Image: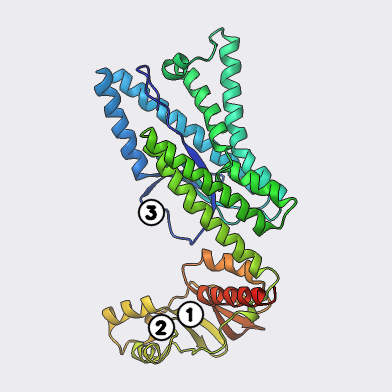
Amino acid sequence: MGNRRGRKIPAACTLFLTVKGNANVKWSVKLCEVAGIGIFVHITFLILLGFLGVSYYLEAQSLRAALMGVLYILSLFGSVLLHELGHALAAKRYKIHTRDITLLPIGGVARLERMPDKPIQELVVAIAGPMVNVVIATIIFVYLKATGQFREITEQILMSGTFLERLMITNVMLVIFNMLPAFPMDGGRVLRALLALKLEYSKATRIAAWIGQFMALLFGLFGMMTSNFILVFIAVFVWFGAGQEAGAAQMKSALGGTPVSQAMLTEFRAMYPDSTLGDACSHIIAGAQQDFPIIEGNHVVGILTRNDLIVGLAQKGQDAPISEAMRTDFITVEATELLDTVLAKLNESSLHTIPVLHHGDLVGLLTTENIGEYVMIQAALKGRHR
């Protein structure tokens, strides 16, 4: 990360991603909340911090050197955290909530509930993070200038400068690195936003994703040639992140303007709270349905998933009523809602099935499988008419 013995400063990236699911961040420790945003640190970052602290001590044989090295790393990742908060607060301006921010050994990840609807909004959110690092570097530069401590930037300063000199340079490097057009990093999102001002959104995403994956290949090759394995990890992260974002954009484009009623499952079986788990087993074996809406009168009161059924059978037996195993923390949607909006709700839900209502009555079920099948059918039909 950088010390007075000439340790190299590795690359660090920052990403902001849309939330996939609502599970807590795994293998992470929550530090605090800022503006309602959970701040987490991944356990691997803590391991890296301890490892580097020991390395600093063994290299310099000095506890003070080890403490200063660890303090520098913490300051660097403090800059990364402020960078991510820049994204989050810019997104909040457009009423987009950030679920959490996680610090990883390769940088930081801010999980947005959704991406901005307009290209200019995505441009603002994407560039807000690097601008925070510009401000940090500028403040340090002004301070060093005002106190007569600023020196011309040389390789020696880069490797073994004072604490503030290295922190200023690192923030400049964070800006430069993150503004490379490697989608879904900040520069890639800026590129996608600029392309989307002139092109259709999914096409702009495809182009940005292709460029991002090409950049990932360059990162990976350079990382292997220089033994910078953090850069290799970043390359892998960028490669798969670009592919995932491109797929999500294609899905959103395919679903745009389509009501839930066109893709929902209409042939399904509903069950009752006093039905037994054994009854549900019979229906699963006899058909393809895995999750069952539980109704009482004309109202949906729960969802029985296959996993909950298996757990219920193991704990309570097949004669137990469904009411003892069903989930009540479910959401419903209206048949007239648009699929692209509902898909976001489905991704945020811990369940894979959403009951579809019309004037309060259950008329269908919506699953990710249904949506995928609908998209494939529409793509086949669209290809046939070309």
Q: Residue furthest right?
A: 198
Name the kind of residue labelled 3 in the image: Lys
Q: Residue at x 48, y 50 (%)?
A: 239
Name the kind of residue labelled 2 in the image: Ser
How many angstroms separate mark 2 from mark 1 (CA)?
8 Å
Q: Nearer the viewer, mark 1 or mark 3?
A: 3
Q: Which residue is mark 1?
A: 302
Which is more N-terminal, label 1 or label 2? 1
Element class at badge 1: strand
Left or right? Give the position of 59 relative to 164: left
Which label is found at residue 26? 3
If the image is split into quadrants, where does the N terminus sit? Answer: top left
Q: Which residue is mark 2?
A: 323
Q: How many marks?
A: 3
Which is more N-terminal, label 2 or label 3? 3
Quarter of the view holding residue 200: bottom right
How many angstroms separate mark 3 from mark 2 (CA)?
30 Å
Left or right? Give the position of 126 relative to 46: right
Badge 1 density bin: few <14, some 14–19, many ≥20, Cα 10 Å: many
Element class at badge 3: loop
Coordinates of residue 280 in the picture (x, y in percent): 39, 88
Q: Residue at x 55, y 11 (%)?
A: 152
Name the kind of residue labelled 1 in the image: Gly
If the image is split into quadrants, where does the C terminus sit? Answer: bottom right
Quarter of the view holding residue 87: top right
Q: Residue at x 52, y 63 (%)?
A: 348
